[in-house]
Amino acid sequence: MTIRRVACSLGLLGFLGWLQPLWAGERIDPEKFRGRITTSQGAKVTYYRTHPFNASYPSIRRAVIVVHGLGRTANGYFRATLESALADHKQVGTAIYAPRFQIAGDNPRADEHFWSGGWSQGHRSLDAKKISSFQVIDEIYQRLSDRRRFPGLRQIVLAGHSAGGQFVNRYAAGGKALTDKRLRLKFLVMNPSTFLYLDRQRPVPGRAGKFAVPEGVKEFNRYKYGLDRLNHYMKSRGTDAITSTMMGRRVHYLGGTLDMGTKNLDQRPGAMAQGRNRFERWKNYRLYVARFPRWRRQAVFQAVPGIGHSGSRMFNSPAARTVLFH
C-alpha cells in the first residue's frame, strides 16, 4: 500500500505535508500537530491532534484519545499512536487526540489549566478555573459527538499506558463519556501501576484466585485503590453508578509480561495489596474481574509477550492495534 493510500485511509490528506518526514524515514514531529482547546471553565489545555475541532471531517470513522504517562509526554504518545495507525494500514479514517495534563512545574501560562499528580485519578486542576481531568475527556467526547464535525464517526477509543492506564481504568468506571448511541466506546488500559477495585476484597499473596479483606493495611480501599473517600468528580457519580458503569463498558487490559520492575511503581500499602509488580497486579485483577459474571463479559485481558514498561512498544503491539483500529 502506498503512503498516499495510507494517508487517505486515515483521513489525513490535509496533513500530507506534515507526514512527509515519515515517508523519508524520519520520525513525525508532534509539535506540528500541537494545539490548545478551551474548556467549559474558560481556560485552555494543550493537546496534539490530527484533526482540529474547527472543521468537518466526513471521512473519519474512528477516533483515538490517548492519555500520556507520568512524564506527561503527550507528544511522544501522540507520535507512537499515529505511527501505529499508519503501520496498521486499515482503510478506515482515524482521528487521534492526545491532551497534556500539565502540572505547576511545567510553567503553565496564565490562561491554562494545571494539576497536581492527581490528574491520573480525575482530580480537579489547581488553577482558579478548577476542572477535573476527567471532565476534559468528557468535553473531548462531546466535541467528537458533534455530527456537524464528525458525521461518519462510529467508534471512540480511550487509551493509556502506565499512569495513563490508571487514568483510563478509573475513567472507564466513572467517566461520563457523553456521546450518542451511534458511537461504540472502547477503553484500552496498558501496564498501569494500580487498578480500581470495586469492593474491599484483595488478592491473598501466594494463593492465586483467592481474595479477602487485607488485615493491617492502611487505606487500601481509599480512592484511587478502591471506592472510599472519592474525589469530587467520582463522588458526583456515586459508588453504585461507578460499579454499574465499570461492569458495563468494554475495557481491554493489556499487560506486558516483562513489566515486573519497580521504577515509578506505586509501592504504598494500598498498591502493594494488589501485587508486587505491574504484571502480577494485572494477573490478580484478571482473576478479580472473573468473579463478577457481568463484568467478565465486558472485560478483555491479554498478555503481551516480551514487552516490559514501554509505552511505544505497547502502542505498536499487534494486540493494541487490534483494539485501536479494528
Image (spheres, helix red, strand yellow):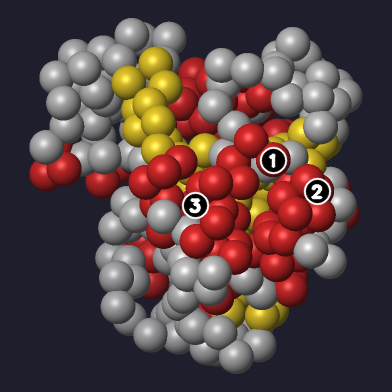
Q: CA distance from mark 2 to mark 3?
A: 18 Å
Mark 1 highlights which residue? Answer: 13
Mark 3 highlights which residue? Answer: 78
Q: Please say if 208 is above or below 316.
A: below
Q: Please say if 43 is above or below 231.
A: above
Give left or right: position of 227 versus 12: left
Is mark 1 in CB contact (under 8 Å) with mark 3? no
Q: Please say if 302 is above or below 11.
A: below
Residue at disc 2, secondary structure: helix
Q: Position of residue 105 (x, y in %)?
A: 11, 44
Q: CA distance from mark 2 to mark 1?
A: 9 Å
Number of residues whose C-alpha sits closer than 10 Å to that of mark 2, classed few (under 14), some (14–19) or many (20 or more):
many
Q: Position of residue 290 (x, y in %)?
A: 77, 64
Q: Position of residue 53 (x, y in %)?
A: 57, 21
Mark 2 highlights which residue? Answer: 9
Residue type for callout 3: Phe
| Nearest the eye: 9 or 25 | 25
The tag earlier along the polypeptide, 1 or 3, is 1
The tag earlier along the polypeptide, 2 or 3, is 2
Residue at disc 1, secondary structure: helix
Q: Evaluate whether residue 106 shows in this view.
A: yes
